Amino acid sequence: MKDVKKTEVAFITQNKHKFIEASGLLDRLGINLIMAPLNKMEIQASTIQEVATYAALEAYEHLHKPLIVEDAGLFVKALNGFPGVYSSYAFTTIGINGLIALVKGKKDRSAFFEAIVAYFDGVELKIFSGRVDGFILNKPVGKNGFGFDPIFSPKESFPKSFAQMSTRQKNKLSHRARAFIAFSKWYTNTVNYT
């Protein structure tokens, strides 16, 4: 690995769990994330890419420095992709038990998490995605993670939920880790190492 200097990128989030996951991945690559807890405006959109893109452009108007925004969704096949782009809202309104109730009696419990990382530096907007396929469990298990982690089990670790994994274990499989790794590969080859 090259001798690299750390560069700072603002991460627009108020979620400490997301920040810990992301900074753990990027720090060793020479990318120093700074938590910037701006209130990000969540638009009503049909894709998480649209939500993340809008939030990145909006946040730049306040910070005027290179930044990233991450948005993610849980897409459940038996529910035609719900909660999807509305995952955060669904979590705060119906919660984990509400989602379990919606899939009760459904034979197909397959689902996937998708994450989008949007980078904007005032000139260039870049989008990176990550996805992990898995299943919705019958009941919440585990105490780690956040959001729907206690009821989502990735195929690679079935029947273990994300909430039963350490951050390090989760970062080997998660949608968020995959999106941040894609960002870091681009960033270290394009922006930081030219």
Image (cartoon, helix red, strand yellow):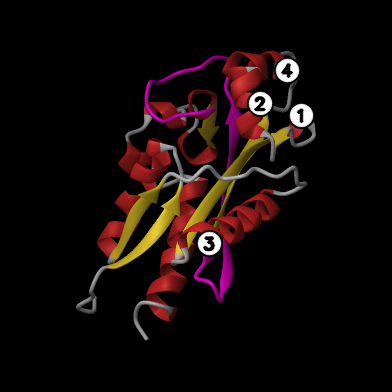
Instruction: Tell me if residue 130 is in the magenta stretch.
Output: yes
* Numbered disc in front, either 2 or 4: 2
Q: Earlier in the sequence, mark 1 or mark 3?
A: 3
Q: Which residues are magenta?
A: 119-148
Q: Earlier in the sequence, mark 2 or mark 4?
A: 2
Q: Earlier in the sequence, mark 2 or mark 3?
A: 3
Q: Residue at x 38, y 74 (%)?
A: 188
Residue 25 showing in the rendered view: yes
Q: CA distance from mark 1 to mark 2?
A: 16 Å
Q: CA distance from mark 3 to mark 4?
A: 38 Å
Element marked by disc 3: helix
* Numbered disc in front, either 3 or 4: 3
For the residue marked with disc 3, what is the amino acid? Tyr
* Numbered disc in front, either 4 or 1: 4
Q: Quadrant of residue 103?
A: top right
| Residue on which disc 3 sits | 60
